[in-house]
Image (spheres, rainbow, N blue to C red):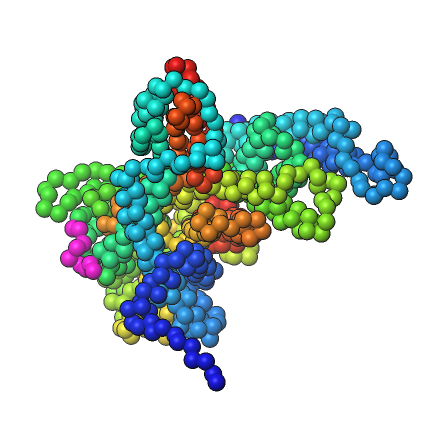
Amino acid sequence: MQTTWAYLSNNLVYAAMGVFALSFLAHAFETAWAVRTPEQSEGKEGSVKTKTLDYTRTERAARIATALMVLGFLLLLAGTIARGISAKHVPWSNMYEFSLTGALAFTGAYLAALRKYDLRWLGLFVSISVLLTLGTAITLLYRDSAPLVPALKSTWLVIHVVTAIISGGIFLLSNVIAGAYLYLDSMESRGERKAWAKRLPELETLDQLSYRLVAFVFPLWTFSVIAGAIWAESAWGRYWGWDPKETWAFITWVAYAAYLHARVTIGWRGKRAAWLCLFAGSTFLFNYVYVNVWGTGKHTYSGL
Amino acid sequence: MSQEVDIPQLGTAGLLRFIWRQLTSMRTALILLMLMGLAAIPGSLIPQRSQNPIAVRQYFIDSPELARWIERLSGFTVYSSPWFSATYILLFISLIGCVLPRTLEHFEAMRAQPPATPRNLSRMEHFQEFAGNGSELELATKWFKKNRFRVRVEGQSVSAEKGYLRETGNLLFHLSLILILLGVSIGSLFGMRGEAIVNKGERFISVPTSYDTLSFGKLSNDESLQPFVIEVIDFVAKYDVLTNAPQDYTATVRVTNAGEKTSTIKTIKVNSPLTFGNTRVYLQANGYSPIVTVRDSTGMVALQGPVPFLPQDGNLRSIGAIKVPDADPQVGFVASFLPTYARDGANGGISVFPEALDPKLLFSIWKGDLGLDSGIPQSVYRIDTSKMERIALDSLKPGETFSYPEGSITFEAFTPWINLAIVDDPGKSYSLYGAIAAILGLLASLFGRRRRIWIRITTTGVVEVAGLAKNGAPGLPAEIEKIVAHLRKEK
């Protein structure tokens, strides 16, 4: 019974990966075919050779891309739930399950935001990063479905880890936007934006959006760290012990605190703020990869 | 002719004031905050004595020269090092220097009235005007009060302000950080932490000599140890048969408080420690103790009882040392206990399941000098065999006996042991309250919106409305629309 659900989960994850791959291709097609070369455009002979984007030509590809993304999300959702049923606990007890849930949350956040904002330009990035996450998870991080070890049997597993996943997803999103800011900023400093990039939002908007995301999620991250401390007190006998994971969570917290102060109190904007944001986000990523894979300490639940 | 530049004398007081200003400036605070983050990094890359003393010792063996330099820079004790302490102490002084004056200012501002209505409202943001009938000021004042604005009425104008919660939250957040630091300090000054291995069936009495390791805060000592007795009645470990992973550990204990005659039965699990006031008892680890009887050549019992062994892997292959100093010559057994025995071509005897389904005790017997009187502290799990001679090698199942020229050993049975951590942290509740207050403060400061709305009736009876949102907080236009609708509807 247990293994049936685990097999089902694996098949669903593979199916989701296939669908995300198709979605990625559809997104790529959408952007690539939207480019009009100067010959085709109705411009005058000898005028400046600027490529233009005409998304009406690829509207159908865009719809297919988003539909595939929704399908991939549903398959991944089913796969994650099946994994939870097979192990009889929440599906984030090791790095493989954490990656599944993280990818699910990331896709979900994108689709939810898509209902409200025109974020389809992010779809190419979202589909490829989800695909890479799932690919890494199922090849390198895969572990058989297993019951929880005693240390993880706590309500805090739900509270601490869910808030950490959500915070991580939003930090990542804000990092992507800060990265896009820096890229577009350097492109604009060399002249006009390239055709494909014209569709992306204004620099000012990106700058604001990246900050808003951090300001929104910083209290949640603080809560996640505190929830972790409360759990650590009841499981390990101390609420803070400078375990590598704790140390890097603290460093991430300090880096984002510095970012918020730099923006609100000193008034940093634009490039400097974006670099600081990228730095803060990379400490989170470092914590996730380094401490889980090579690190020591008490947070060794990755199963690697 | 060179011009003499007259530099004003700074003086000691001036210098101090200059340093204080520099230290409490926002830029310095920000740099200190970043430094604090950077200073925390080495401790996650270099093994720390407080977490992993064995790895530190290994570091000294592997690269002694580098280790000595790291030691000189407090690299193995980063979080109690002078430079780390200096960073956070400076940061907190800077924080206090920032926050205290602002708290006083904010306190004054909260008692003061909102600033008067500007003379020319049409220059302000969100300006609009409409013809009124004279009752608007009164209506507006009521509306503002109902919506918890601070109101100042002056002549034919009303000035209203709301959103002081933003700054209150900001200050609360920073003051809470001080409370957290206070909690951490109290814990490290007055706390205590000790560990002890207790076999099933044995009693643990909380006196200094019963602990395997025991450390006190700088301002606390033996006398603050809470006396209690814990008897381990039972310990059950459950494992998953497919993955060998542990599923549940439950220790059943009988607890007697000092001075009390009655005792109570309690259970301890990994996530649910036993609590006596500030002191908590945690189930940290477990393993097996083989119960052995060692006799000398005359048949006299030289050692009898359970000997705790140290688990080496997930299947609880455990190593240990049975030392018999009272035998003549001294005898030692370098042994391993395998709860579910199997043979492996490469490693010899291994364990394939953590539960004791087919237990076996493997050992080599050594005679000579155990080195217990040398004064050098020894591990209870290892034997220094440099001054000893190996006389035999064998394995036993429970109930079996092995005889050798100097005596015999009987592997009677085995029993589980548990490692209890006893921790007293009187500062933790302060840290917790600080953390809760910090989150509330943070939410208020990030989502609070400070804004002003002004209303004036001009001499011609026209009602003017305008507003100002601080920090570009959104939502003010909608609020102004609301009050304008309210004023016009009621006409």
Q: Is residue A21 placed above or below B73 in the rendered structure?
A: above
The one of B176 and B386 positioned closer to us in this rendering: B176
**Which residue occupies the extreme front position in the image?**
B460
Is residue B319 in sight in this rendering? Answer: no
Residue in the image at 27% along x and 55% along y: B185
Spot occupied by residue B46 in the image (x, y as percentages of width and height): 45, 62
| Prevailing secondary structure of the magenta residues | loop
Spot occupied by residue A255 in the image (x, y as percentages of width and height): 47, 52
Image: magenta residue range? B219-227
Q: Quadrant of residue B440?
A: top left
Residue in the image at 55% along x and 53% along y: A272
Residue in the image at 54% along x and 29% along y: A82
The one of B316 and B306 positioned closer to us in this rendering: B316
- Please state, as top left, top right, bottom left or bottom right, where the C terminus of chain B lies in the image: top left
Residue in the image at 20% along x and 44% along y: B277
Q: Is residue A84 left or right of residue B448?
A: right
